[in-house]
Image (cartoon, grey):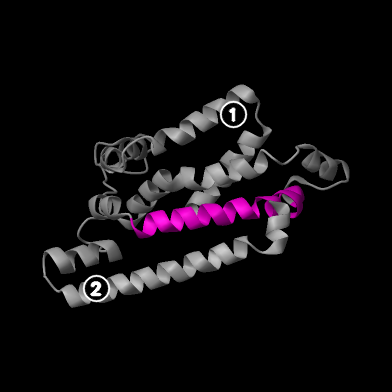
Amino acid sequence: MIGTTLLGVPIALLYWHAGRNVRQIIIFLTLIPMLTSNVVRTFAWIVILGRQGPISEALMGLGLSGSPISLMFTEFGLLMAMCQIDLPLIILPLIAILTRTPVQLSEAAEVSGAGPWRVFVTVLLPLMLPGLLAGWILVFASTSASFVTQAVIGGARNVYVPQLIYREVGTLFDWPLASAIAVVLLLSTGCLLVALTMISRHRRLVGHA
């Protein structure tokens, strides 16, 4: 959620300040991943993170690596893939909030002497909180159940809960343990989603929405 937030907030703010043509481009680029199969996006990241991929070529071109490197089967590579795949889930709620926010609010704060960071912290961030909470709920629900990306990009060395449940059922045939893990995953995910939903329905946040 942290990675998607750090990437999604600047894109949403760019959309808010941009003109009509730029806004259409941002929406188009945001929706493209959602219109593509998760399997296709995951296998595209295999090429990007591989030894002959653009990341490896860029590192060698900049002199940061003397030989091809692969980010496959690493936590960093999986983090990059998951952030890109789930990024639209946090951008769209933020855009929905900001489109109802007049640009004059930030302009009035700037006229009053507030700097860019103060405008963001005191004016824009409170307005964006409902969108952020909605995005966090969607991103967490997506990542907690993302089996294909975790299995393909993470590999066998990085075993996550969905993979662990699949292995216990399909390979080791330990159904009681798989059921126990699934219940723990379901309860922990449900508790977090309920907590985020209750926070998003707080009267102060509803007043900003």
Magenta-colored segment: predominant secondary structure: helix
How many numbered callouts?
Answer: 2
> Residue 142 falls in which quadrant of the image?
bottom left
Seen at 61% across and 60% down, the residue is 200
On the image, numbered disc 1 is attached to which residue?
Answer: 23
Residue 162's spot in the image, x, y percent? 27, 62
Residue 106: which quarter of the image?
top right
Q: Amino acid at mark 1?
A: Arg
Query: In the depicted view, which residue is nearer to us: 61 or 143?
Result: 143
User: For the point 66% across and 36% down, which residue is it?
Assistant: 16
Q: Relative to 58, is 122 above or below?
A: below
Drawn side of residue 88 relative to residue 98, left or right: left
Q: Earlier in the sequence, mark 1 or mark 2?
A: 1
Magenta segment includes 136: yes
Give the structural element (helix, strand or loop) at label 1: helix
Q: Residue furthest right?
A: 112
Residue 150: x and y in percent read 29, 55
Relative to 81, 90 lies left or right: right
Is residue 185 located in the magenta-colored stretch of the structure? no
Picture disc at residue 179: 2
Q: Which residues are magenta?
A: 118-145
Q: Is residue 160 visible?
A: no
